[in-house]
Structures are given as structure tokens and as C-alpha cells.
Amino acid sequence: MKPRQQRMLALGLAAIGIAIAAAFTLRAFQDNMMFFVEISDVVAGNYPKQRNFRIGGLVVDGSVEREEGSMDLRFRVTDMACEIPVSYVGVLPDLFREGQGVVAHGRLGEEGVFVADKILAKHDENYMAPEVAESLAKHVENKTAPLRDGVSECNPNDS
Amino acid sequence: MWKFFHQLASPPHFYRLAAVLSPWLAAPGIALIAYGVYAGLFLAPMDYQQGDAFRIIYVHVPSAYLSMMAYMIMAVSGGIGLIWRIKLSHAVAAAAAPLGAAFTFLALATGSIWGRPMWGTWWEWGDPRLTSELILLFLYFGYMALRAAIDDTAKADKASAVLALVGVVNVVIVHYSVEWWSSLHQGQTLMKKGGPAMDPAMLYPLLAMILGFTLLFGSLLLRRVRTEVLFRERRTRWVREMILSPEGS
């Protein structure tokens, strides 16, 4: 083998090695790489219980309720299969709208209410997030759960 | 064909070629950017959700794209330099790094300014797209620092080329982060299946800006490679003859 080919081989092998190492690392940190947890996973109990986490989904149309004379806010977030109520006190981003994507940071309180300490709006690439859109499309196809008040009786294990 | 490549790799030949090519890239690049700025600010309609604030994409998207493009140029020319021992390609890699870092910074800064009114936050730790783009900036800094730390050019070329190649993993992560994981950042608009999800009146200025930024980057890169070549070849005869000749240049 010529020296040039040796170098080529060495670089190629190194590249494959790095790619495999990176793939394993990313797999190991899969849960931490997720910016938010989907609603179905929260309902199924697949969420970090030791720490605060983020949920992502769509604000249910007509679900936003404001307490008169305070900053208290309640609304529901859905991934079209399951929905959970969220409570929040504070200022909302401009893009927060019913029917739009939202990411809420906080913890799951009693009676399945997600108590948010931070609300972020998520705008879509149509000038819906691919993962939300995907999970929407997925669940719309299944048509498993009719949406109800409060925690919907969905079956998150279907998906 | 091979003769063309051999000539291209010769520093004096490339030095002259770059001088000829640079303005031919800069002129259409600046024209496209001028059109893109005008059309993006005045002709494109407001976005149905984001209003006028979406117009920052006309700087943000080309910068973010070039931040990755410049890195790939840096890594690939570093790799070519390692395998074929071509000094010129190491010079290209060295010249690309500060440009790439500048575009990465621009992408982070414009993204942050955009994120404040749209998402409600300047910065979110834990978002994969944001974090990997920041790591990209640090990779550029590390690359430049490594080069500056080694006095021997040949050694600096080799070490930094290896660093650049390892860092390619991060560019892949930046690109696919919005597909692999949930992210605050929206998904692909331009490369979306079934065509760009964008009004044509918004899209054309954006494409003009992307092409314009790329051409301008190409022109700047050629100019930087010229300086880099001149410095690296400062002790050679062709440089001395060129500088001492009456025409100079």
C-alpha cells in the first residue's frame, strides 16, 4: 500500500469510529436531548419524576381561562390524543395563541395539573413543529381518543 | 483534467487565479444581497403568525447555512491536505475558519434576537439546535486557537485538520437536531418534503440572500486564501520576484 492510501484508510477508519462513538453517546443521552416530553408520554408516566421538565403540544382551542384581576392562567395542551391542564402565573410570549404550538417548563402537580413556571411559544415551519405535527398526524389517524375536559381518557400505549 | 488540478494546487497559480475570480463572485453576490434586502423588507408580505419579525430570516438562514458550509469546506480541505499532502488546501482550511466563526456568531445573534419576541426567550439551554450551534462556534474558536498555538505550520496544519474532521460530527448534529429530537426550533422549511413551506414572495428574496451570502463568502474566502498563501510562501522565490517586480501586486 502506498503511504497516501494508508493515510486515506486511517482517516476513513477514524471517521467510522468517531461516527459510531457519537451514535452511542447520542443514544445514551437520548432522553436528555429531547427538549420537551410529548403529552401522551406524560399521561403514560414516561417523564422525569425527579426534576422539572418541559411539555410540548398545541394549546386547545377555547381552553384558555384567565382569572379576573390576576395573572393566573389556565389552559390545556394537547397532542391530539391526550391533553393535560396547565396552570401558569406570569407574562406570555406574543406568539402564545389557541391552536398554536407551546412549550411549558414546570412539574406535574396534584390531580394531573402541570404547574408551569415558564411558557415558550413555538412557531411552525410554515412560516407546527415536525415532531408535534408527526405526533398529531399519527394520533389523528388512530382517532382513538375523544377529547374531554380535564385529563382525557386516552390510551397512550397505542402509539 | 489532472493537469488542471495540479496547476490549481500550485500556490503562485492559485494566487493569481483567486485575484481574478474574487471580484466575479463579489459583484453578483452584492447585487443579490441588495435585491434580497429590498425584496425581503418591502416586497415580501408579513408572516401570518410572526408579523414583521420573521424578516430576520433573511440574515439568520443564510448565516446559519454558511456556518455549516464553511465548516465542511474547512474539514474537507483539511482532510485533502492530510491525505494528498497539498499545502494549498491547508491554507484554504486556515482561511475558512474565521469566516465560519463570524457567520456562526451572526446566526446565534440573529436567532437570539428572533427568539426573544417569538418564543419568549433569548436562549434556552437544552435545546439541541441552539446548543449544537453554540458548540460549532466553540469548535471554530478551538480550531483557530490550536493553529495559533503551534508555531510550525506543517504541524499546525495536521493537528488542526484532525480537529476539524472530528468536529464534522457536530455539523451533522446541527443539521438533523430538529428531526431527531424535539426542539423549540421549528423544523425544516426549505428542505421540507413536497417543497418549501413558504409563500413564494417570501421565498425568492430568501433564496437570493442565501446565494448572495454564499457568493460573497466565496469571494472573501479567496481573498483570505491569497493572504494566507502569501504569508506561507513568504520565503519562496516567486513571492520575492513578484514583490520586487515593477508592477508589484
Image (cartoon, helix red, strand yellow):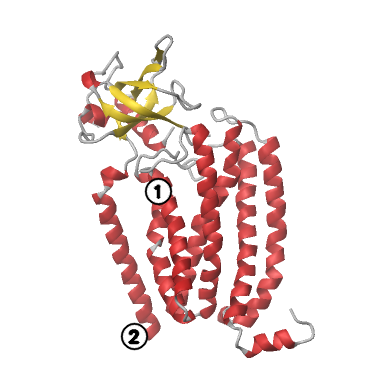
Q: Is residue B195 visible?
A: no
Percent across and percent down for residue B90 are 50, 75
Local crowd at mark 2 within 10 Å, few (<14), some, or many (≥20)?
few
Question: Which one is nearer the viewer's eye here, A104 or A90?
Answer: A90
Q: Is residue A124 visible?
A: yes
Residue drawn 54% across the image and 28% down it: B49
Which kind of residue does numbered mark 1 sit on?
A: Thr
**Subunit ID for the residue under disc 1:** B
Residue drawn 64% across the image and 48% down it: B208
Q: Give the left or right position of residue A80, taking residue A41 as reference.
A: right
- How many numbered markers are drawn? 2
Which kind of residue does numbered mark 2 sit on?
A: Met
Which circle marks residue B131 in the picture?
1
Which circle marks residue B154 in the picture?
none
Q: In which quarter of the image is the C terminus of chain B?
A: bottom right
Q: Residue furthest front?
A: A69
Residue drawn 45% across the image and 24% down it: A91
Q: Give the left or right position of residue B131, taking residue B24 as reference.
A: left
Which circle marks residue A1 in the picture?
2
Percent across and percent down for residue B163 are 40, 68
Percent across and percent down for residue A147 are 31, 17
Question: Which one is nearer the viewer's eye here, B208 or B61?
Answer: B61
B85 relative to A103, above or below: below
Quadrant of the rendered image containing residue B171: bottom left
**Subunit ID for the residue under disc 2:** A
Q: Which residue lies furthest to the right in this view?
A: B246
Give how far apart the Cα atoms at labels 2 and 1 are: 42 Å
Percent across and percent down for residue B181 are 34, 43
Instruction: Give the label, 2 or 1, closer to the camera.
Output: 1
Q: Give the left or right position of residue B241, taking residue A70 as reference.
A: right
Which secondary structure lies at badge 1? helix
